[in-house]
Amino acid sequence: MSMITTIVAGATLGTIQFPMVSLMKQMGIGPNLHAPIGAGIGIALMCGFLLMGRTTRWHYNKSFFWSIQILIAIMVFAISTSRSAWQLGAYSIAAALGLSVYFISDLYYAVSITERRIHATSIHEICTSGGYMIGSFGGGALARLIGLREIFLVMAGVIVLALIAQILIYYRYRRRLIPSPISKPADLTQAD
């Protein structure tokens, strides 16, 4: 589940950082605002990492993670409807803050559940950079086919589909671990 999220989070960040520059140009937003918006995205990621590192309340809290994904999808959708630099900046910075939750949490889970920490960290980074490549390159290529604003709609849809996949995986896996309440308990009174 976390690999799905990390790949999609990387793709979302790649889409926000690269094809969004072309959207800014299309909207008539000059280079003097490209850097502040880009810096705002980086600062949001750093602040999210800092906040997540200062608390453990989020550990194993699926409702929190699923809610954050919905928020990210809404912000990415909102990017497609932006009409000003301030809207574009606010939505992308809010999305980046949400994305920081996924990058840091996946890394935490990767190193906390295994003794092969270097291997787990490598997998995390491969998923992150692979997703980033998909979002930046794929988003740019897709923008040529369907338009700049539309790629953010597609990305929001991908986030929602990934969330649905995670929920299905979670409940399917959970069903295997927790016995059904209607299953009969083993008869412990019989002697072997």
Image (tube, rainbow, N blue to C red):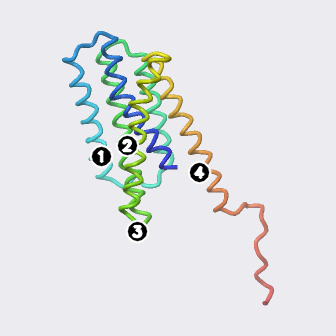
Whichever of callouts 4 and 2 sits on the residue coming sooner in the sequence is 2
- The crowding category of the residue bearing disc 3, from other C-alpha atoms within 10 Å (few below 14, some 14 to 19, many at least 20), is few
Whichever of callouts 1 and 2 sits on the residue coming sooner in the sequence is 1
Q: Nearer the viewer, mark 1 or mark 2?
A: 2
The residue depicted at 39 percent of the width and 29 percent of the height is 15
Question: On the rendered image, what quadrant is the C terminus found in?
Answer: bottom right
Left or right, 174 with respect to 34, comes to right
Residue 41 location (% of width, % of height): 28, 32
- The crowding category of the residue bearing disc 2, from other C-alpha atoms within 10 Å (few below 14, some 14 to 19, many at least 20), is some
Dot label at residue 170: 4
Q: Which residue corresponds to mark 2?
A: 129
Q: Nearer the viewer, mark 4 or mark 3?
A: 3
* Distance Cα–Cα, label 2 vs label 3: 23 Å
Residue 125 location (% of width, % of height): 37, 49
The three-letter amino acid code for the residue at tag 4 is Tyr
Left or right, 111 with respect to 36, comes to right
The three-letter amino acid code for the residue at tag 2 is Ser
106 or 117: nearer the eye? 117
Q: Which residue corresponds to mark 3?
A: 115
The three-letter amino acid code for the residue at tag 1 is Phe
Whichever of callouts 1 and 3 sits on the residue coming sooner in the sequence is 1
Q: Which residue corresponds to mark 1?
A: 49
Q: Determine whether the residue tagged by mark 2 lies in a helix, strand or loop.
A: helix
Residue 171 location (% of width, % of height): 63, 51
Residue 33 lies, with reference to residue 121, above or below; the image says above
Q: Nearer the viewer, mark 2 or mark 3?
A: 2
The residue depicted at 76 percent of the width and 81 percent of the height is 188
93 or 28: nearer the eye? 28
Residue 180 location (% of width, % of height): 72, 60
